[in-house]
Image (cartoon, rainbow, N blue to C red):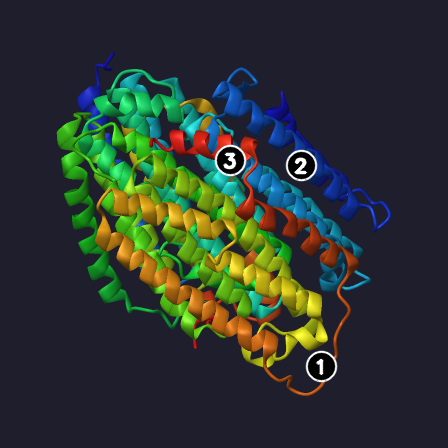
Amino acid sequence: MELAAILLIPALASGFALLPTNRHFAAPMTVAATVVVFILASAVAVRTTHTGRVDALGQWLTCDGLGALILALVALVAMTAALFSWGYIRIRAGHSERRKEQHYYALYNLFVMSLLAVPILANVALMWVAIELTTLLSAFLVGFEDTPEALEAAWKYVVLTTLGAVLALLGFLILYWGSQVAGYAPFTWAGLVEAAPRMPPALLWPAFLLILVGFGTKVGLVPMHTWLPDAHSQAPASICALLSGVETTTVLYVILRLFPVVGGTPSLDARPWFVGFGLLSVAIATLLLIYVRDFKRMFAFSTVEHMGIILVAAGLGGAEAHLGAAYQMAGHAIAKSFCFFAAGAVATVFGTQEIAAIRGLVRFAPLTAVALTAGAFAITGAPPFAVFISEFLIFKAGIASGQYLTIALLATFVVIAFCAVMFHINRMTFSTPLGSVPATALPLSCSATLAVAAIPLVVIGIYVPPALQDLLHAAATAMGG
Amino acid sequence: MHSPHFSVIFSLDALTGALFLLTAIGVVATRQVLASLQLFIAQSLLLSLSALLLGIALGSPHLFAVAGITIATKTVLIPWLLRHTVSVEVYRTREIDRVLNIPSSLLIAAFLVVIAYAIANPLLGAVDLPFARINLPLGLAAMFLGVFTVVARREAVPQLLGLLALENGVFFAGVAIVPELPVIAELAAAVDVPVVALVVGLLTRQIHKRIGSTSVGRLAALRER
């Protein structure tokens, strides 16, 4: 029943946001709704680790280990981003624009609902619709600032990701065709895994490639990534946290679901494709990280890099690499959303996103500076943060299975990316200030978000609670390793 | 199972497929925005005609539903939505300045059709479905032409129509390869497509209001410098 409530609550919250009430209603109501959703999602995640899977509404909704991990991550970031929005969107919308704020929260809740629906809808065709809705519902959130740049970003985002989604749709239709040829099987992930060995490889293969390329566009895999830095830099910081932190991961989750489907057919091997696409994304993102001039774009390229790392980890194969991939997904969602909150705070205080325009941050806004630096360390995989451990797990698994070249390349790029990000962050934080800066005060909700979001950021690198550990293992098992 | 007029229906579907491909090529090559919209409506009608023919041949009520949904959403609802979101000025636009000129666009279009047949062949070799022989390669070709339209056109509405033509191509293949797709999936897709048109139409309006043109292909403020 929790699964149905998880979808119902944001839908109701979206409607309430539009009620012609006091302008101070929509923001706290959204925060409250996302807190409830997070508690429910955590409960589902815990139950999944005990029972293997949770079904609801006569099996229309279902959730296994991998789905529960994504569900919990989306709910967590939706909660922190809602809290961040409270003060941040009030400044961005302008103090007189009540309608604009209400529209923001109405779309925000619907966008969150579509993200939550992806890992729990049992029917694969409906899941495709949910993914398509994540794009359509977030288009106006990306273009929220209504500047020419923001509208350009929103346009590219909608057109290119929809194009990708339609290619993926043909892939899913071919998969359904294959499962019909193989004899009747329900059009669910479990049904597809069951039917795959009896499907003609001539059908399974193009379906796999269409979905990999089509949804790879939305994940931001190189060379289909071109829209991603634009959308992830022009959207309000709270939306960037959702886009970069969990939307990409949610779509990557669908690609990872194909792994056990294709894995059942001996004549096909998905692994070289995963490793190839992953390494290419990591390599190009690393190069772009060196030359980047806008710090929100920098974190966007870091997302491309991380999606590549997770894909490589999945392609390495084996239980340990898949555990690394699951851990990396959790670490990335938590750290990247935190980075965008910090970046949004910096942009609010300084009124610019140019790396070159910000010097000596630590003297003007010491807490924000600490947050930005900590976020940068966490996302680039410095100890003691979670990404360090997950990357270590992935390297270890790759070496143990003798894939030295892949690991050598991956490790090189990860180290270069670390240096590039820290170089930019260091200049922003510590170098001599460029004259006096009119510092805008940071809204209370933004500081509060940084404090709240810092808790999981710091904790899961040092101590993984047993419940989360079980969840990560369950997710790795569902990935087929 | 098979209707007595199978071979007649088969030929009619082949004719529909040929016209379907022509409209897809038309969307690539037309300069006027309004003409592109009319071609898209014609293409959607041909898609529902093919669904209807296959529905008769296979005795499948699903496909009648597909035909009905397609007519309702793509030939009535979407043009209505676009007329109410995008201003008349945009429809009067003629695209003078294109990424590629029309002869080279047509050459690439022909090449894409050949590729579509090459890709469809191994699939058809694995599973023999009579109507898939017509609909799968032509649907793939329309799909590639849709991608090409999105890339080659600079105006907002033709890019959107390229996207919708791409979706038509996928469904043109879909009615033949998965005639028994659950109705819930068709309904969901039927909701999705008008939402695409609505969102992109509203975005076009906002771009027109803010930038004064809908030449989205020329927007290039965001890039690596």
Name the quadrant containing residue B174.
top left
| Residue A410 appears in the picture as rendered | yes
Residue under label 2: A10
Measured in 3D between alpha carbons, the distance from the residue under mark 1 to the one under mark 3, in whole angstroms, is 42 Å
**Closer to the camera: disc 1 or disc 2?**
1
User: Secondary structure beneath disc 2?
Assistant: helix
The disc, 3 or 2, on the residue closer to the chain's N-terminal end is 2
Q: Determine whether, in the image, residue B27 is placed left or right of residue B122.
A: right
Quadrant, the C terminus of chain A: top left
Q: Amino acid at mark 3?
A: Leu
Residue furthest right as drawn: A22
The disc, 1 or 2, on the residue closer to the chain's N-terminal end is 2
User: Which residue is painted at 39% across and 29% down in the image?
Assistant: A477
Q: Residues within 10 Å of mark 2 (few under 14, many from 20)?
A: many
User: Secondary structure beneath disc 3?
Assistant: helix
Q: Amino acid at mark 1?
A: Val
Q: Amino acid at mark 2?
A: Pro
Residue under label 1: A437
Give the x, y percent position of residue A114: 56, 39
User: Which residue is painted at 38% across and 45% down in the image?
Assistant: A393
Residue furthest top as drawn: B1
Measured in 3D between alpha carbons, the distance from the residue under mark 1 to the one under mark 2, in whole angstroms, is 40 Å
Give the x, y percent position of residue A132: 48, 42
Quadrant, the N terminus of chain A: top right
Q: Is residue B105 above or below residue B72?
A: below
Give the x, y percent position of residue A184: 31, 15
